[in-house]
Image (spheres, helix red, strand yellow):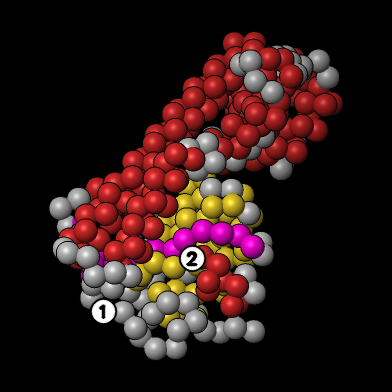
């Protein structure tokens, strides 16, 4: 059993610290991955940022809290001290850019919004934005070209190109976050309409299919939305509403259990009692007695 996190001050598999404060390094993804049989154990880099461009093939990407299964063009940004690992399908191609944290921080000191965006590991699928992916890959390759030659103003060129890479990735990540926000807002709107329909129809017999059709979505989609908002299925939301309605009558009226069932539009008092007990953990009678002893 592993009891220690693998920590590299340099690149993966390097036993010694190799980087300088302005360390920038590019290499083909397959150059290092192939040496390790395409399996990169979970590890951290103390003071290095990394950008992975995965061009084709499948990959499993792991962080401490999330796992991504990717296929095709994918971009991964990994901050320092972030646990991460990879399982690549043999033959997967791509390129990896590694930058010392001191250089990265200095580069983005006038762009705090970009810096904050990448405080956590980011994984972007770019299969539908292949032009963006190719642009970033081309910019990384330009850094590699500069790195391997002694062109005039080499350092300034690398710094400028790295800044362009950060801007491109930031814009892609921001667009993805906006899409998620729009999606979340739409989900919340559908959930509110669903709850409104439960109240207005006031019918325990109304099926989830009918509710879904009203929202012009599938049952699966409605369930997914309900779970994202309440951590409960659509039918559980319906049951909860009618149980809460029944509780009011049980607490504040002298109606019998059967009368309460009819009041909240259940046709079968026995079924109402079974459902109530399933949701609350007490029968309607026990709930009424226990609550009245507690509150009155």
Q: Residue at x 33, y 57 (%)?
A: 142
Select label 2 or label 1 by which is in front: 2
User: Which image quarter: residue 22?
Assistant: bottom left
Mark 2 neighbour density, 10 Å: few (under 14) some (14–19) many (20 or more) = some
Residue 29 picture location, percent across and down: 51, 65
Q: Secondary structure at mark 1?
A: loop
Query: Could you say which quadrant of the image residue 253 lies in?
Result: top right
The label number, if any, that marks residue 210 in the structure image? none
Residue 35 percent location from the top left of the image:
59, 77
Q: At which x and y percent is residue 60?
A: 61, 59
Sequence order check, earlier mark of 2 and 1: 1
Left/right of residue 49 with respect to residue 54 in the rendered view: left
Q: Nearer the viewer, residue 172 or 27?
A: 27
Q: Quadrant of the C terminus?
A: top right
Residue 28's disc is: 2
Mark 1 sits on what residue?
A: 20
Residue in front for this viewpoint, 80 or 220: 80
Q: Is residue 173 left or right of residue 42?
A: left
Residue 189's place in the image compared with 168, above or below, is above
Query: From where the camera sits, is residue 70 visible?
Result: no
Dot 2 and dot 1 residues touching (CB under 8 Å): no
């Amino acid at each position: 059993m592993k009891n220690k996190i693998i920590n590299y001050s340099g690149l993966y598999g390097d036993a010694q610290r190799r980087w300088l404060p302005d360390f920038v390094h590019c290499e083909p993804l397959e150059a290092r991955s192939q040496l390790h049989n395409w399996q990169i154990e979970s590890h951290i880099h103390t003071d290095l940022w990394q950008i992975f461009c995965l061009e084709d093939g499948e990959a499993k990407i792991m962080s401490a809290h999330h796992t991504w299964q990717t296929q095709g063009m994918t971009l991964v940004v990994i901050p320092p001290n972030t646990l991460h690992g990879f399982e690549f399908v043999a033959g997967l191609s791509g390129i990896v850019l590694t930058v010392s944290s001191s250089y990265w921080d200095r580069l983005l000191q006038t762009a705090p919004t970009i810096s904050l965006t990448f405080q956590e590991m980011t994984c972007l699928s770019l299969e539908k934005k292949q032009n963006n992916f190719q642009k970033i890959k081309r910019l990384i390759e330009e850094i590699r070209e500069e790195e391997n030659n002694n062109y005039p103003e080499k350092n300034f060129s690398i710094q400028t190109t790295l800044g362009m890479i950060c801007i491109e990735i930031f814009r892609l990540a921001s667009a993805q976050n906006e899409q998620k926000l729009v999606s979340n807002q739409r989900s919340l709107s559908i959930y509110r309409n669903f709850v409104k329909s439960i109240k207005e129809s006031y019918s325990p017999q109304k099926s989830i299919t009918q509710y879904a059709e009203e929202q012009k979505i599938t049952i699966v989609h409605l369930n997914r939305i309900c779970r994202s908002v309440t951590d409960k299925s659509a039918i559980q939301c319906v049951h909860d509403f009618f149980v809460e309605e029944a509780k009011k009558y049980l607490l504040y009226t002298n109606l019998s259990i059967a009368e309460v069932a009819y009041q909240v539009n259940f046709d079968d008092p026995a079924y109402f009692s079974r459902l109530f007990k399933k949701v609350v953990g007490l029968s309607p009678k026990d709930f009424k007695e226990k609550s009245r002893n507690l509150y009155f």
